Image (cartoon, rainbow, N blue to C red):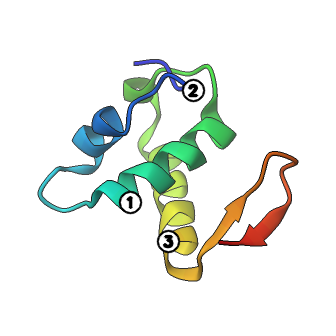
Amino acid sequence: MKIDEQLTTDAVLERLGRESASDYEADVMRAVLIEQHAGRDLNELSEAEWLAAFGQMNLRKTTGWIKDDQNEAKPE
């Protein structure tokens, strides 16, 4: 599945593991993937790329920081 605005959180949740990830984590991961890997195929990311995105997702979910439309960080 292509990483773009049409990417569903369901597809991300499938890759994260349904039993170990929440809908919120999938939503945050989706945002990270779109920022870092837009246009790529979700299933073709290397393990290193996936783990880097996963780390960024974990940072954002615990700190509450997200990116706005102007790509500036702001608290949620």
Dot 2 falls on a residue whose secondary structure is: loop
Dot 1 falls on a residue whose secondary structure is: helix
Assess disc 3: are there few (<14), some (14-19) or many (≥20) residues with their C-alpha within 10 Å of its C-alpha: some
Q: In the rendering, at what x and y percent does residue 53 appear? A: 53, 52
Which badge, 2 or 3, comes first in the chain's sequence? Answer: 2
Residue lying furthest front: 76
Dot 3 falls on a residue whose secondary structure is: helix
Q: With respect to residue 48, does 4 lie above or below?
A: above
Which badge, 1 or 3, comes first in the chain's sequence? Answer: 1
Which badge, 1 or 2, comes first in the chain's sequence? Answer: 2
Q: Are marks 1 and 3 in contact (CB under 8 Å)?
A: yes
Which amino acid type is shown beneath numbered disc 3? Lys
Q: Which residue is mark 1?
A: 25
Q: Which residue is mark 2?
A: 5
Assess disc 1: are there few (<14), some (14-19) or many (≥20) residues with their C-alpha within 10 Å of its C-alpha: many
The structure residue drawn at horizontal position 78% and vertical position 70%, both measured from the top left corner, is: 74
Distance Cα–Cα, label 1 vs label 3: 7 Å
Q: Nearer the viewer, residue 31 or 55?
A: 31
Q: Which residue is mark 3?
A: 61
Which amino acid type is shown beneath numbered disc 2? Glu
Which amino acid type is shown beneath numbered disc 1? Glu
Distance Cα–Cα, label 1 vs label 2: 17 Å
Q: Are marks 1 and 2 in contact (CB under 8 Å)?
A: no
Q: In the rendering, at what x and y percent does residue 28 appear? A: 49, 55
Q: Nearer the viewer, residue 75 or 42?
A: 75
The structure residue drawn at horizontal position 30% and vertical position 55%, both measured from the top left corner, is: 23
Q: In the rendering, at what x and y percent does residue 19 appear? A: 11, 57
